[in-house]
Image (spheres, rainbow, N blue to C red):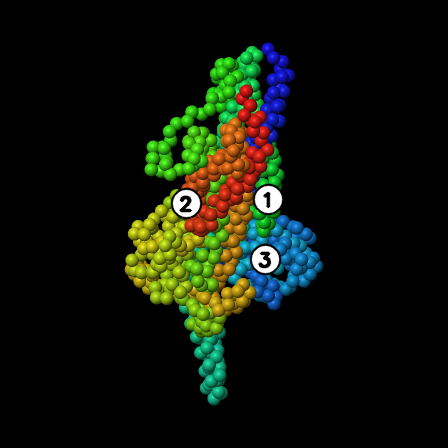
C-alpha cells in the first residue's frame, strides 16, 4: 500500500490546488454562521442583561395605582395577599420652574424597585433630590433646582438641592417616559426625594413583588404566574372602590355641613344687624354666593365617581414604554433570526453540493489511482469528507467569532440605545454554537460524503478514465420548431447546455433565488417599517392633540378652554372617548382599545378612515363599527361579522361595518346613531380632537402645557409622543435590516462567483475548442456566461416571488399586538435586488473574461491525455 504520507500530501494539495473554491466555501459558511449567531444570540443576551438589571434593582412585578390615591388601608390589604411583598411610595408630577418640562418626583424606595445611583447619592433629607441621569450636564451636584406646583400639589417645598443622579428601576426608556398631568403632557424626567418632602398621607403607587415569581421575566412560567398574581391583587381590591367612595363622600359632606353651619350663623348675624337698621346688602351677597358654591359642592359630591384601582405590570405601567419596547425588540429580532439563517444555510447547502460535485469530478483520476494502489473506498471518500470538515470548521469558527463579537454587539447596541439598561452584555451560548456546527455539517460535510460515495463507487479502471461528458438530448424547445428555427447558433447552444447540466441549472436558479429572496425580505421589511409613522400621523390621523375634559369642570371653565382652542386651532371635533380593556381569544394579554364615538358629518377632516388595499374611504354609519386593521386581525373578523364588546356596562354583539388602515394602537370608530341603537342612550362628548395652527414640536408642546394648567382639562395627548415611540421601535429594526441586506448581497456575490467558477473549470476544454476555432475573447466569455445570465434572471423571478412570501411571513411575527407594519412595498423593493444581481453578474463577467484570456487553451485541450 502506498505511504500514508502521500495520502496526506494529496489531501493538503486538494486545498492548495484551488484556493478560490476553498475560500468560497469557507466564506459561505462563515456568512451563515455570522447571521445565525449574530441574530440568535442578541435576544438571549438582551434578555439576560435585562434580567440582571431587574434582579439588581429588585424591580416590582406588579404595581397598583388609584385615581384618588392609595390609603394605608389599601396598602395593608395588598400585604395580606399570599406571597406579596409590598412597598408604597408617594409621587407628584411637577414642572421645572419657568419651563414646561414635566418631572415625576417619587419618594425614595427602600426595598422594591431601587433606583440605581450613577453619581452622588440618594437623598437623606427632605430638601435633597436625586435627578434622572438624562439631566446630568444640565444640573450638577450641589445645584439648586426649583419646581412649579401643579394642580394637586402635595409637596411641602418647591426647591431642592441636587445630591445625585439615578437610573430608574421601572422607567427604562430615556426618551419616551410616558404621559404626565402637567407640562406638555409628556414626562421629561423623574427624580426621587424622601417621603418627608410630601405633606399628603396618600400613596401614589404601591409596588409589589411576589415570592413565586423567581423565573426570568421572558419565560412562559413567569408570565403565567404573573397573570395569576395580578388576578389575586385585583380580587383583594375588588370592593375598595366602593368603600373609598363612601369615605370620600362622608368626608366631603362633613366639610359641607361645617360650611353650612357657618353660613347659618352668618345669616343669623345678618338678620340681627338688619333689625338694627344696618346695611347688610354686601354681606347678603356674600351669603348668596357661598350658598351657590355649597349647592355646587353638593352636586359634585353626588356625582363623584367611584375610585378605580388599576393593577399594572411592567409593560402597562405609566412610563413602562421602555420596558415594552425592549421586550418587543427582543422578540422581533429573535423571529428574524429564526428565518434568515435557515434560508441562508439552505442556499449554502445547494451551492456546496454543486461545488463538491465538481471537486469530486476533478479528483476522479487521483481517486482511481489510490483505489488501484490498494486504498479502500472508505479511505478515498474520507479525503472529501475531511475537505468538507476542514472548510466547514474554519468557516463556522470564523462566523461564530464575527457573529458573537461583531454582529451581535452592533445589533444589541442599536436596539438598547436610549435605555437605562445599557448595552447588552455578551454571554456564551453553547446551544447556538452547536447548531451552527450541525448546520455546517449538513451544508458542507454531508454533500461531500454523498457525492463522493456516489461518484467513486466505480471500479478503479473506470475512475482512471476521464468522466464521459453529459449525454445531450432533445430539449422541449427543439420540439417547438416555429421557435427553435428562429434561434441563432449561440442561443441554441445556450438552451441545450442549460438543460444538459440540470444540477448546475437548479443550483444557479435556487442560489440566486435565495439571495434575491433574502434581499427582497430585508428591503421589504425596511420599507414596511419606514413609512408607518408618516402614514398614521399625517395621512390617517389628521388631528394633533386629544384634549380630554375634566368631568368636574363647570361650564365657565369649559368656555375658557373653547376660547383658547379657537385661538390656537384650525378646527376641533367633540367626541366621546373611552378606553376599553378587552380580552381577545387567542391573544395572551388584554388589549387597550380607544373607542371614539362621533357624528359622521365632517369626521373625515380629523380621521381619514380608509381601506389599506385600495385607499377607498370609509364613513361612519348606523350599520356597524369601523375597526383598526391590527385589531381586526387579532379578532379574526372581516366586514359583516360581529365582535363581543363591553359597552355602557353590558357585553354586546357589535357588527363590523369596515376595517380601516391603522398601524399603531387599537381603535374602534362608532357613529353617534349606532351608539344610540346599541345602548339606547345619547353619546356624551368628553374629549376634543384638535388640529393646531402650528404643530411644530415646540409650539405644540406650549399649547399642551397651557391646556393642562386649565381647570377644565384632565388629559392632553400629543401625537408627537406616539410618533417618537413608533420611530424608536421602527428605527432599531430598520438598522438590523440594513445589516441583513449587506449580508444578502455578500451571499449573492459568493454564490454567483462559486457557480461561475465551477462552470468555467468544468467546461474549459469546450471553451478552448471554440477559441481555437476562431471565436473572439468576448464571444468565448458570452458563450458560457450567457447561460449564467439566463439562469440568474430565472432565479431573480423565482426569488422575487419567494421574497414576497418571506417578507409576508416575517412581518407576521415581528412587531407587537399594538403595532402593525405596512405589508405593501414600493417598486424599488423589486428593482434593487434585480439591479444588484445584474451588477454582480456584470463584474463577474469582467472577471471571467480576464480569466479566460489567461488560460492556456492548448494545455487545456491536452489535459485529459
Q: Nearer the viewer, residue 465 or 289?
A: 465
Q: Position of residue 836 (x, y in %)?
A: 51, 44
Q: Which mark is residue 587?
A: 2
Mark 3 secondary-structure assignment: strand
Question: Which residue is painted at 45% across and 70% down in the image?
Answer: 570
- 3D distance between C-alphas at marks 2 and 3: 33 Å
Is residue 175 or residue 202 the one in the foreground?
175
Residue lying at the far right of the rendered structure: 142
In which quadrant will I find the C terminus? top right
Q: How many marks?
A: 3
The answer to which of 296 and 409 lies nearer the viewer is: 409
Q: Residues within 10 Å of mark 2 (few under 14, many from 20)?
A: few
- Location of mark 1 (residue): 410
Decide which of tag 2 and tag 1 comes sooner along the chain. 1
Q: Which image quadrant for residue 471? A: top left
Q: Residue at x 67, y 54 (%)?
A: 164
Mark 2–mark 1 distance (CA, rounded to whole Å): 32 Å
Seen as rendered, the residue at the extreme bottom is 277
Q: Secondary structure at mark 1?
A: helix
User: Mark 3 = which residue?
Assistant: 189
Q: Is residue 471 above or below residue 177?
A: above
Residue 742 picture location, percent across and down? 55, 43
Instruction: Specify the farthest residue to the front.
Output: 774
Amino acid at each position: 500500500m502506498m505511504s500514508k504520507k502521500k495520502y496526506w500530501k494529496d489531501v493538503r494539495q486538494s486545498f492548495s490546488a484551488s484556493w478560490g473554491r476553498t475560500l468560497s466555501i469557507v466564506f459561505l459558511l462563515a456568512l451563515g454562521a455570522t447571521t445565525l449567531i449574530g441574530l440568535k444570540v442578541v435576544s438571549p443576551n438582551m434578555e439576560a442583561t435585562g434580567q440582571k438589571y431587574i434582579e439588581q434593582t429588585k424591580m416590582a412585578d406588579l404595581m397598583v395605582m388609584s385615581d384618588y390615591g392609595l390609603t394605608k388601608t389599601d396598602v395593608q390589604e395588598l400585604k395580606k395577599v399570599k406571597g406579596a411583598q409590598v412597598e408604597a411610595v408617594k409621587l407628584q408630577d411637577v414642572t421645572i420652574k419657568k419651563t414646561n418640562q414635566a418631572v415625576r418626583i417619587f419618594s425614595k424606595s427602600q426595598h422594591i424597585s431601587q433606583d440605581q445611583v450613577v453619581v452622588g447619592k440618594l437623598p437623606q433629607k427632605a430638601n435633597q433630590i436625586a435627578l434622572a441621569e438624562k439631566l446630568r450636564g444640565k444640573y450638577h451636584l450641589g445645584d439648586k433646582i426649583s419646581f412649579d406646583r401643579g394642580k394637586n400639589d402635595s409637596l411641602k417645598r418647591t426647591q431642592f438641592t441636587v445630591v445625585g443622579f439615578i437610573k430608574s428601576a421601572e422607567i427604562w426608556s430615556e426618551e419616551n417616559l410616558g404621559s404626565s398631568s402637567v407640562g406638555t403632557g409628556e414626562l421629561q424626567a423623574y427624580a426621587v426625594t424622601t417621603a418627608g418632602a410630601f405633606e399628603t398621607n396618600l400613596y401614589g403607587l404601591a409596588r409589589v413583588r411576589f415570592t413565586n415569581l423567581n423565573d426570568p421575566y421572558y419565560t412562559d412560567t413567569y408570565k403565567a404566574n404573573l397573570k395569576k398574581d395580578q388576578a389575586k391583587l385585583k380580587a383583594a381590591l375588588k370592593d375598595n372602590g366602593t368603600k373609598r367612595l363612601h369615605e370620600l363622600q362622608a368626608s366631603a359632606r362633613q366639610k359641607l355641613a361645617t360650611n353650612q353651619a357657618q353660613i347659618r350663623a352668618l345669616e343669623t348675624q345678618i338678620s340681627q344687624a338688619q333689625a338694627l337698621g344696618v346695611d347688610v346688602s354686601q354681606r347678603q351677597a356674600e351669603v348668596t354666593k357661598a350658598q351657590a358654591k355649597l349647592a355646587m359642592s353638593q352636586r359634585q359630591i353626588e356625582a363623584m365617581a367611584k375610585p378605580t384601582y388599576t393593577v399594572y405590570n411592567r409593560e402597562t405601567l405609566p412610563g413602562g414604554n421602555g420596558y415594552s419596547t425592549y421586550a418587543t425588540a427582543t422578540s422581533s429580532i429573535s423571529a428574524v433570526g429564526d428565518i434568515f439563517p435557515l434560508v441562508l444555510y439552505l442556499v449554502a447547502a445547494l451551492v456546496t453540493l454543486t461545488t463538491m460535485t465538481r471537486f469530486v469530478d476533478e479528483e476522479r483520476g487521483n481517486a482511481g489511482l489510490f483505489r488501484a494502489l490498494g486504498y479502500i473506498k472508505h479511505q478515498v471518500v474520507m479525503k472529501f469528507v475531511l475537505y468538507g470538515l476542514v472548510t466547514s470548521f474554519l468557516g463556522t469558527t470564523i462566523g461564530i467569532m464575527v457573529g458573537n463579537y461583531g454582529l451581535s454587539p452592533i445589533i444589541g447596541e442599536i436596539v438598547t440605545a436610549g435605555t437605562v439598561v445599557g448595552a447588552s452584555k455578551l454571554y456564551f451560548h453553547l446551544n447556538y454554537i452547536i447548531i451552527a456546527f450541525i448546520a455546517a455539517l449538513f451544508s458542507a460535510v454531508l454533500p461531500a460524503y454523498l457525492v463522493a460515495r456516489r461518484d467513486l463507487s466505480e471500479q478503479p479502471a473506470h475512475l482512471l478514465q476521464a468522466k464521459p461528458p453529459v449525454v445531450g438530448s432533445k430539449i422541449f424547445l427543439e420540439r417547438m420548431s416555429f421557435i427553435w428555427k428562429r434561434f441563432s447558433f449561440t442561443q441554441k447552444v445556450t438552451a441545450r447546455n442549460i438543460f444538459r447540466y440540470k444540477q448546475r441549472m437548479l443550483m444557479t436558479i435556487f442560489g440566486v433565488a435565495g439571495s434575491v429572496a433574502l434581499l427582497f425580505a430585508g428591503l421589504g421589511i425596511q420599507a414596511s417599517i419606514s413609512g408607518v409613522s408618516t402614514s398614521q400621523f399625517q395621512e390617517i390621523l389628521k388631528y394633533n392633540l386629544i384634549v380630554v375634559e375634566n368631568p368636574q369642570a363647570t361650564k365657565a371653565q369649559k368656555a375658557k378652554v373653547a376660547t383658547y382652542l379657537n385661538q390656537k386651532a384650525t378646527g376641533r371635533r367633540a367626541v366621546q372617548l373611552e378606553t376599553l380593556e378587552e380580552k381577545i381569544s387567542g391573544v395572551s394579554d388584554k388589549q387597550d382599545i380607544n373607542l371614539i364615538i362621533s357624528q359622521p358629518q365632517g369626521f373625515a377632516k380629523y380621521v381619514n378612515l380608509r381601506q389599506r388595499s385600495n385607499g377607498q374611504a370609509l364613513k361612519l354609519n348606523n350599520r356597524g363599527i369601523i375597526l383598526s386593521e391590527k385589531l381586526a386581525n387579532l379578532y379574526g373578523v372581516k366586514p359583516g361579522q360581529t365582535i363581543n364588546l363591553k359597552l355602557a356596562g353590558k357585553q354586546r354583539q357589535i357588527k363590523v361595518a369596515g376595517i380601516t388602515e391603522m398601524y399603531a394602537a387599537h381603535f374602534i370608530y362608532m357613529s353617534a346613531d349606532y351608539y344610540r341603537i346599541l345602548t339606547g342612550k345619547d353619546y356624551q362628548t368628553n374629549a376634543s380632537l384638535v388640529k393646531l395652527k402650528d404643530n411644530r414640536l415646540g409650539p405644540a408642546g406650549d399649547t399642551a402645557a397651557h391646556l393642562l394648567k386649565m381647570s377644565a382639562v384632565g388629559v392632553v395627548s400629543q401625537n408627537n409622543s406616539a410618533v417618537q415611540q413608533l420611530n424608536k421601535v421602527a428605527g432599531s429594526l430598520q438598522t438590523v435590516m440594513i445589516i441583513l441586506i449587506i449580508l444578502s448581497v455578500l451571499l449573492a456575490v459568493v454564490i454567483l462567483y462559486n457557480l461561475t467558477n465551477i462552470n468555467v473549470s468544468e467546461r474549459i476544454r469546450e471553451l478552448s475548442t471554440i477559441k481555437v476555432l476562431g471565436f473572439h475573447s468576448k464571444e468565448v466569455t458570452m458563450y458560457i456566461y450567457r447561460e449564467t445570465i439566463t439562469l440568474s434572471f430565472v432565479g431573480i423571478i423565482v426569488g422575487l416571488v419567494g421574497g414576497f412570501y418571506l417578507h409576508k411571513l416575517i412581518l407576521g411575527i415581528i412587531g407587537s399586538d399594538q403595532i402593525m407594519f405596512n405589508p405593501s412595498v414600493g417598486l424599488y423593493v423589486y428593482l434593487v435586488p434585480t439591479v444588484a444581481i445584474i451588477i454582480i453578474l456584470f463584474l463577474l463577467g469582467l472577471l471571467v473574461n480576464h480569466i479566460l484570456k489567461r488560460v492556456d487553451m492548448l494545455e487545456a485541450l491536452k489535459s485529459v491525455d
